[in-house]
Amino acid sequence: MERTLSIIKPDGVERGLIGEVIKRLEADDLKIIAMKMIHMTKAQAEGFYAVHKQRPFFESLTTFMSSGPAVVMVLEGENVIGRYRELMGATNYKEAAEGTIRKEFATDIEKNVVHGSDAPQTAAFEIAYFFNSFEIVR
Ligand code: IDP
Ligand code: MG
């Protein structure tokens, strides 16, 4: 069993896509074991994306991620990290496969609606960044 962190980013919440994303998770049998709405401060977004600190898009990305409410979830299942990344599609929506969340809904390489962890180690860091053990229900 694997766990991953999912975020419906501020653009997804603003555009009314919470239900659309959750519908797709459930349709693909990705089990939600924690969920809440948050509004990250700039500092919290910077800590979350610390791995991208040197990237040219870091400033813009962390401003965007702290610009409004987001929904954070923990998903659990076999190979859930890869399965959820498949549902999301490529980072750049222009390169994302047909039928993926980003292909259908992203408007920009940055405003791409959803986040998903990319490996077990990053998933562990990202889940612990937003959830304590009492908030994870299983
Ligand atoms: P991922 O979200 O698919 O794992 P990462 O490379 O980890 O992609 O990048 C984190 C986030 O940073 C992306 O989801 C996107 O919002 C933003 N981002 C990535 N590359 C660029 C870029 O070239 N320009 C602007 N924003 C970017
Ligand atoms: Mg990433």
Image (cartoon, helix red, strand yellow):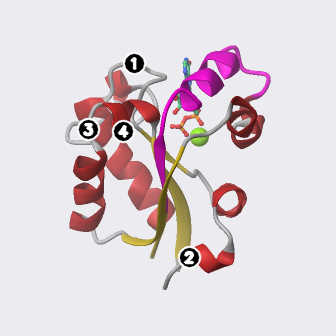
Q: Secondary structure at mark 2?
A: loop
Q: Which residue is disc 2 drawn over? A: 136
Say which label, 2 or 4, has the lower sequence index.
4
Q: Which residue is mark 1?
A: 108
SS at badge 1 = loop
Q: Position of residue 104 (x, y in %)?
A: 22, 33
Q: Position of residue 87 (x, y in %)?
A: 33, 50
Up the image or down, 51 lies above or below 5; here it is above
**Disc 4 residue: CB within 8 Å of ligand 1:** no
Q: Are marks 1 and 2 in contact (CB under 8 Å)?
A: no
Q: In the depicted view, which residue is nearer to us: 33 or 99?
A: 33
Q: Earlier in the sequence, mark 4 or mark 1?
A: 4
Examine the image and state in which quarter residue 31 appears. Answer: bottom left
Q: Quadrant of residue 50?
A: top right
Q: Are marks 3 and 4 in contact (CB under 8 Å)?
A: yes
- The amino acid marked with disc number 2 is Ile
Dividing the image into four equal quarters, which quarter contains ligand 2? top right
Q: Is residue 45 above or below residue 26?
A: above
Q: Residues within 10 Å of mark 3 (few under 14, many from 20)?
A: few
Q: Amino acid at mark 4?
A: Val
Q: Write down the residue under mark 4.
A: 13
**Residue that badge 3 annotates:** 16
Instruction: Confirm or deny contact between disc 3 and disc 1 (CB under 8 A).
Output: no
Residue 20 shown left or right of residue 34 in the figure: left
**What is the spatial separation of the Cα atoms under label 3 and label 4, in whole angstroms?**
5 Å
> Which residues, given as a range, are shown in magenta?
53-73
User: In this image, 47 relative to 15: left or right?
Assistant: right
